[in-house]
Amino acid sequence: MSTIAARIEAVQQAASAQALFVATRALAEADHGESIDPAAIRCLVEVLGFNNPGAAVAAVDGLIRLGSSAVDPLLTSLDPRNYGARAWAVRALAGIGDVRGLELLEEALATDVGPSVRRAAACGLGQLQLASLEAAERHQVRERALSALVAGCTDGEWVVRYAVAVGLEALGRRMEPLPQQRQRTLTALEALSRLELEPTPVVRLRARLAQQRLQEQKP
């Protein structure tokens, strides 16, 4: 039996919450070499649906390490009846940064009931990997991500607004010189930095820092 297969079996046969966590972490940290075992991805995705936050965190870390190979299994496994699994999937997709997760990240930032999930989605929208896309598609994805982040500026939780500021900066740093998108980004950050519009000091400070960094960046 291969090392990967043995680690998958250990996850499947775990008899306690602690054993599941340890086995999942071992699988998440496994070296797949040049060929990623699809069964390992399926196993990590399944763990997201278990009622074990420690194991789910380890599974998310493992799926992020596996990168784009994990995106389709994550998206096809989504079950609207299992909120926990969906929330962990959002975190994984945010960390991977594949544009195939864009729709789910948009939806999560706009509607998810969990502030931590909305926060992850906001960060993920700023970190989407766009380099491999054609120019027209890059523009469309950036526009959708920017629109979602601008809307997120009015989120009711300060941790989400903080993450929106982080996402806006990350997205703005990787934008091609498109004046309208750049101005919308700076305008959104300006709103987050103003005392009369943003009550939380740490959010205002983070927005100002993002503004400063983007303004110092050569267009």
Image (spheres, rainbow, N blue to C red):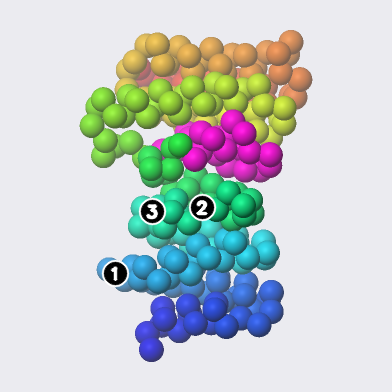
- Which quadrant: the N terminus? bottom left
Q: Nearer the viewer, residue 121 or 206?
A: 121
Q: Quadrant of residue 51?
A: bottom right
Residue at (68, 42) in percent of width and height: 114
Question: Label 3 sits on what residue type?
Answer: Asp
Residue at (38, 43) in percent of width and height: 100
In the image, which is nearer the foreground, mark 3 or mark 2?
2
The magenta segment is: 104-128
Direction from residue 210 to residue 98 in the image, left or right: left
Identify residue for label 2.
78
Q: Reading the chain from its start, which is encountered first: label 1 or label 2? A: 1
Coordinates of residue 167 in the picture (x, y in percent) = 52, 31
Q: Main secondary structure of the magenta part?
A: helix
Q: Nearer the viewer, residue 120 or 74?
A: 74
Question: Label 1 sits on what residue type?
Answer: Ser
Identify residue for label 1.
35
Identify residue for label 3.
72
Reply yes or no: does residue 105 show up in magenta.
Answer: yes
Coordinates of residue 42 in the picture (x, y in percent) = 44, 66
SS assignment at label 1 = loop
SS assignment at label 3 = helix
Q: Reading the chain from its start, which is encountered first: label 3 or label 1? A: 1
In this view of the protein, can residue 52 be seen by the observer? yes
CA–CA distance in space, label 3 to label 2: 10 Å
